[in-house]
Image (spheres, rainbow, N blue to C red):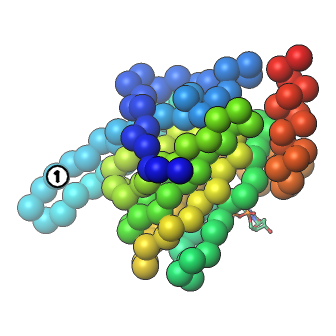
Amino acid sequence: MSTETCPVMELPKLIEPGHYSIDACRRVDLPKIEEPRGNLTFIEGGQHIPFDIQRVYYIYDVPGGAERGGHAHKALHQLIVALSGSFDIVLDDGRNRKRIHLNRSYFGLYVCPMIWREIDNFSSGAVCLVLASNRYDESDYYRKYQDFLSDVKRQQL
Ligand code: TYD
């Protein structure tokens, strides 16, 4: 699977149940204040991303060749940013699959619920920042791809 360009989200929009798909997962261009002394990017919940931020986490010190993700969320909305370095995100809605390369700290990838994601190809020193619409809740996860797929098919009936 080759790396694809991701559609850009012009006006942030919360994707509602029934419309979850990899095409609903959009690149968000974040504000960037450029100055000779360095750049600054900021993210406001409900303003630059279509949800209020309840949780922030980040993945770092990833050993070469390691993979993260490997799950889907039932109701969680997320924005994923390559704060430093780069990595790939494979998005899968149970029907289609695509690979997105993230390598700019002023681009975010909005990922709606019901998307299986795998994160790999981490560069050395990469930091993956995730802004999430809810607190950590293990019951919101699909940890097994087959369970995810069964629910995608059931919801399509
Ligand atoms: P997990 O979501 O599986 O990480 P990855 O993004 O690589 O798939 O989480 C790894 C572990 O960290 C798991 O035991 C749950 C725990 N965890 C929390 O306690 N709080 C959190 O906010 C997150 C994201 C994970």
Residue drawn at x 50%, y 67% is 121
Residue 67 drawn above or below residue 152: below
When asked about the image quadrant of residue 85, the answer is bottom left
Residue 19 visible in this rendered orientation of the protein:
yes
Q: Position of residue 81 (x, y in %)?
A: 46, 54
Number of numbered discs: 1
The one nearer the camera, 151 or 45, is: 151
For label 1, the residue is 34
Residue 130 drawn above or below residue 112: below
Residue 131 visible in this rendered orientation of the protein:
no
Q: Quadrant of the C terminus?
A: top right
Q: Quadrant of ligand 1?
A: bottom right
Q: Position of residue 42 (x, y in %)?
A: 37, 48
Task: Find numbered disc 1 in the image and state the secondary structure of the residue it sits on.
Answer: strand
Residue 65 drawn above or below residue 105: below
Residue drawn at x 90%, y 45% is 147
The one nearer the camera, 6 or 32, is: 6
Residue drawn at x 64%, y 29% is 21
When asked about the image quadrant of residue 102, the answer is bottom left
Query: Mark 1 vs ligand 1: CB under 8 Å?
Result: no
The one nearer the camera, 100 or 52, is: 100
Please give left or right for residue 145 compared with residue 84 in the image: right
Q: Mark 1 Cα within 10 Å, few/some/many (few <14, many 20+)?
A: few
Q: At label 1, which amino acid type do we have?
A: Glu
Q: Position of residue 62 (x, y in %)?
A: 56, 78
When asked about the image quadrant of residue 114, the answer is top right
Residue drawn at x 22%, y 58% is 39
Taking the view exactly as shown, the residue that stands out farthest to the left is 36
Residue 36 drawn above or below residue 17: below
